[in-house]
Amino acid sequence: MISEFSRSGTPGLINSVADVGAVIRATRQQYGLSQSQLAGLAGTGLRFISELERGKPGIQLAKALDVIATLGLQLQIGPGQP
């Protein structure tokens, strides 16, 4: 996933759960959704959304992908830079 919200030090690259959380938070806010509303739309709990946005390690990937899809985002994986 390419984003202007990266905290990784490499512009545009997502390298951590915190980076993913920052993109999710910004997108949710752009849509004017509360965390509770997003949780309902994505079929997750409010606590999960809160932890995801804060970059908590060990989040469930399947749930995170549901949230990403709910926001109309995509997660792309490719080879890293040498």
Image (spheres, grey):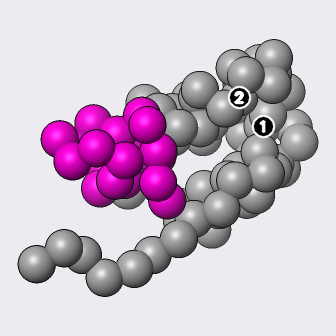
Left or right of 27 on screen, residue 31: right
Q: Given the current orientation, which residue lies at the most extreme bottom position?
A: 79
What segment carries the magenta color?
A: 1-21
Q: Examine the structure image and report whether residue 44 is included in the region drawn in magenta.
A: no
Q: Are marks 1 and 2 in contact (CB under 8 Å)?
A: no
Classify mark 2: residues with Cα within 10 Å, few (<14), some (14-19) or many (20+).
Answer: some
What is the C-alpha distance between the residues marked 1 and 2? 11 Å
**In the image, what residue type sits under mark 1?**
Ala
Q: Given the current orientation, which residue lies at the most extreme right position?
A: 41
x and y percentages locating residue 53 in the rendered image: 51, 33
Label 2's element? helix
Whichever of callouts 1 and 2 sits on the residue coming sooner in the sequence is 2
* Residue at the (79%, 34%) spot, across then down: 38
* Residue at the (72%, 39%) spot, across then down: 45
**In the image, what residue type sits under mark 2?**
Arg
x and y percentages locating residue 69 in the rendered image: 76, 57
Q: Which residue is mark 2?
A: 28
* Residue at the (27%, 36%) spot, across then down: 7
Q: Main secondary structure of the magenta part?
A: loop
Q: Work out whether residue 79 can be spotted.
A: yes
Q: Which residue is mark 1?
A: 39
- Quarter the C terminus occupies: bottom left
Choose mark 1 or mark 2, whichever is in front.
2
Left or right of 75 on screen, residue 32: right
Q: Work out whether residue 51 can be spotted.
A: no
